[in-house]
Structures are given as C-alpha cells and as structure tokens.
Image (cartoon, grey):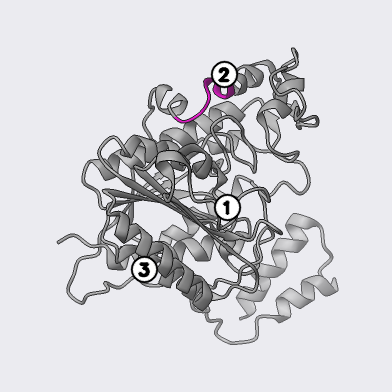
Amino acid sequence: RARARAAVRRIPTAQFGYEVGDPFVQGIVNSFKDDPVCLRAAKTALPVKPAVPGQRIKPISVVAARGHQIHHVKARGYVERPIRVRQIMKGLEGVPFVEVACRHFPNHHVTAVHDPKLVSYLRAVCKRLDDKAIIYPEVFPIRRPEKAPKALEDRAGYFCADTFTPITSMVYKAARQAVDVALTAADLVRGGERFAYALCRPPGHHAERRIFGGFCFFNNSAIAANYLSGDGKVALLDIDYHHGNGAQDIFYERDDVLTLSINGHPRHAYPNFSGYGDERGDGKGLGFNRNWPLEPPCDDDRYLRVLDEALKAVRKFRPRYLVVSLGFDIMKGDPTGSFDVTPDGLERIARAIAELGLPTLIVQEGGYAVRNLRVGANRFFGTLAANWFRG
C-alpha cells in the first residue's frame, strides 16, 4: 500500500504541479485502503463462453475505419467524435475477433444508391476547403429547389437536411472510406462468412438518395445492402435509436430489400419528419417498409417484444442476407436518445439476431455515450461470438 500511495502521489505533483499536501492529492492517496492493494474485477471485458458446451467460438470478422480521425469536428457539442471508434475497439478486446484490412471499391457502388450530384458536390466542396474551414448549412431551398446557388459554400443547404452536419475538407475522404469499410465487410459475407462487422465512421443511416444529414454523408448500410442484393433478397434492420430514414428513402419503391426500423417516435426524435408506422413503401415496394416508432419509456422487455415482431417480418421475407444498422444510442444514458436498454438487453438483442441463422452484416451507426460504446460492443459482440460458431 505504501508503494502504491507513493506512486500515485507522484503523478499529480510531478506532472500537473500540485502540492504534496493538496486535498485533491491526499484524497487520491488515501483512497488506497487495503494492504496489500488488490485489483478490482474487470467491469466490461466479460469472458466469452460458447452458447453450446463443446463448440468452438468463431472469431468475429471486423473491418474498421482506421483513417477515420481525419474527420474531427471540434466544435463544442458535436458528439460524433473519433473517440467513438476507440471505445468500441476497447470493448472488443474481450471478444475473439480478427481484423480484416479495408479494400477500396469503385465509385459506381456509391452512385448506384446516391444521386451523382450529391456525390460530386461533396467531393468538389471538400477539395476547395482549407484544413480549418467548416461549413454549416444555413439556408434551405424549399421554395426553389431547382435553382441551386453558384457558390459551393452556399449550396450546402441544397443537399443537407439539418443545421448540425457540417462539411470540412476531410468529410468526403472519411465518408468514402466508411463506404469501403461497409463493402469490404459485405464482401466477407458474400464469400461465406456468416457474420461480419463494419465499424464505420462517419455513420450513414440518415443519408438519403440526394441529401445528407444527421452526421451522415453516404449511407454505408444501404450501399452494402444494394451490393448484396445482386445475389438475392436483403433485409435491412435498423436498431439505432433514430429512424433509418436513409434506407427508407432509397428502397421505398423496391420489393427486393425489406427495410425495418425500431426508432424513437419522430414526434420527439430526429429526423422528426419520418419514422411513422404508416410509412409502408410505394409501388412495387408497398408493404416492404416497416417502422416501429416508440415513445419512452422503453426498457429491455418492451424493446425485445418489438424486435420479435421485426424478426418475424424478416423470417417471412426469407432474405438471403441480413444487414443490421447498429446504434448503441438505444442504451440508457445516451445524450441523443431516450430508451432504457441495458447491457443485458443488448445481449438479448444479439442472441435474437443470431437465432435467425442468416449471413449477417452489422454496420455501425450511432451511439454517443463513451461508456455505452465500450460496454455495448463487448456485450453485443461477445454474445454473437458465443452463439455463432463454426460447425
């Protein structure tokens, strides 16, 4: 104990200039009470055990956005930060996984889903900005949308849904890399992996065909789902707190991609204009879009009851692939959500998804409470690793 106290006393005094007798320093030193000092048990990295005794646990294939740090909006209150990926990777330390290098895919996969004008605009405006420049959309052309302004900086509102998704010089590069992450993971599923995780940043599920917003620029999940649909039907299940308006918009008139979203009620939750239960698709897509808007409170049991309905729709659809848009903002304490899903609830969600037995791509979307990202990743993927094993 004496040696531990001496060591921790040294840190604030030598590194931060505190006096030895400072009450703050003494409080830290005196917190070491047991002798000898014992380490507490780990809180997050739970041991992963097979769901079926004797089965070998299957490592999870993970593709991560390793260059995502180039997109870092430092404005006060901007919650979509680089630390999100670091915390998720910390959570995965207690889970068996293998990291797969990201590959580059041609741009036609992006323009198959997004309006080429949106793609060209983001590429062009980012090239023109210097490293410190930042553009917040301010004016939105609801009266004359066909008359886009000449200046690229003034044109942001023509392509954006809100005022809090700024453009910086690195947005296009980071968003394009996130697409490559999703497509690399999708290719693993196409190649026979039963499960792959695309740790994307920035997220993508609010990006519609011709607009970006909600921290999202390109719709990683939708681009991957469209890519997989070349082999057969795809179900896209969005379990982020916020409605998956992007996939709904992109696939609304298609019957080969079933889009499902369990979300906070749009009366109170972003994006506010979509996510209602009566939005069921149009034309060929009528009946192939489902939303479950939920008012708070929403605990584990309530969420799992609704998830059971969504998974029944997946089974009825009989897809070849499942894409899951995963958001840890459904967890209790997220600054952008109002659900009360616990770590135990995440385990139950993962188990229910695993029981579908479908080749599944998980794409990272939201989640902004640091501890929830770490704990949520550990519990969700630890459960999947225990339930998805090699035969």
**Element carrying mark 2:** helix
Q: Residue at x 27, y 62 (%)?
A: 388
Viewer-nearest residue: 244 or 92: 244
Provide the residue span drawn in magenta: 113-119
Q: Is residue 208 visible?
A: yes
Q: Residue at x 72, y 46 (%)?
A: 78
Q: Position of residue 319 (x, y in %)?
A: 29, 50
Viewer-nearest residue: 277 or 349: 277
Q: Is residue 381 above or below residue 283?
A: below
Q: Is residue 243 above or below residue 118?
A: below
Viewer-nearest residue: 360 or 270: 270
Of pointers 1 and 3, the one earlier in the residue sequence = 1
Q: Residue at x 30, y 38 (%)?
A: 187
Cα distance in 3D space between marks 1 and 3: 21 Å
Q: Nearer the viewer, mark 1 or mark 2?
A: 1
**Element carrying mark 3:** helix
Under mark 2, the amino acid is Ser
Q: Which of the numbered marks, if any, corresponds to residue 120? A: 2
Q: Which of the numbered marks, if any, corresponds to residue 315? A: none
Q: Which residue is mark 1?
A: 243
Alpha-carbon neighbours of circle 1 within 10 Å: few (<14), some, or many (≥20)? many
Q: Which residue is mark 3?
A: 352
Q: Position of residue 220 (x, y in %)?
A: 47, 39
